[in-house]
Amino acid sequence: MGNLVCDAMRWKLQGDVAFTNRGGVRADLSMGKITPRDVFTVLPFQNELVEILLSGEFLRELFEDKLAFGGSGMFVSGLQIEVDRSRPPGDRITVFKIGGEEPKPGKLYRVVTTDYLLEGNSGMAKLFEHYDEATPAGVLMRDAMVEYIREHSPLNPKLDGRWKFIQ
């Protein structure tokens, strides 16, 4: 479900990367016809999408910080992240790719996330450093998902190794 949510976020704002916290995705969808009410059960909060330009280096540090405090990870799109929790905090990410490639030094990537995370919530205090650089999209996360489902049905959900814990 988290893959679908983040794919919808990234698609709506044409980002390179999208991410959201696991706690914001509250249900799964059943097979068959999906209604806006169904999407509301998945995404019951008024989270608005925001876009921001961030470097690959910053994104990696952001996710390292999230992991350092025992975070269970994030839902992501456009990223491949592998984590080894046996490594010391700050060095747990063993694979970090954007669009299938290592981030290019100094390159800024178009990132889509929520106003909730931009405010530093859910272990994303580092993201708040860039609060003034973000652009609110004027789109609720769930509205982007409803539109994505309409445009991409039938859906074919699958796990694709975007975020993996290895030992």
Image (tube, rainbow, N blue to C red):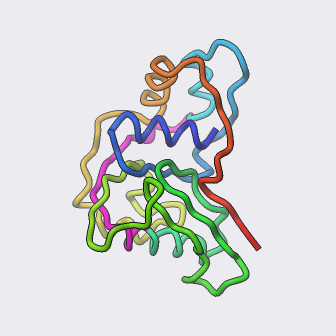
Pick out the residue farthest to the front: 101
Query: Is 32 on the left or on the right of 145, as rendered?
Result: right
Residue 151 spot, x, y in % from top left: 45, 19
Q: Where, quadrant-wise, is the N terminus in this rendering?
A: top right
Indicate the position of residue 145 as horizontal and vertical percent values.
49, 29
Residue 28 screen position, x and y as percent: 70, 33
Please tell me whether residue 156 is drawn above or below residue 35 in the rendered image: below
At which x and y percent is residue 117?
Answer: 44, 56
49 in the magenta segment: yes
Q: Residue at x 38, y 73 (%)?
A: 57
The residue at the point 41 percent across, 50 percent down is: 113
Residue 113 appears left or right of 94: left
Q: Nearer the viewer, residue 55 or 127?
A: 55
The residue stretch that appears in magenta:
44-59
Q: Nearer the viewer, residue 56 or 112?
A: 56
Which is more toward the observer, 142 or 45?
A: 142
Query: 52 above or below 156?
Result: below
Task: Let me know if residue 164 is in the magenta part.
Answer: no
Can you name the residue that lies furthest to the bottom here?
88
The answer to which image quadrant residue 92 occupies is bottom right
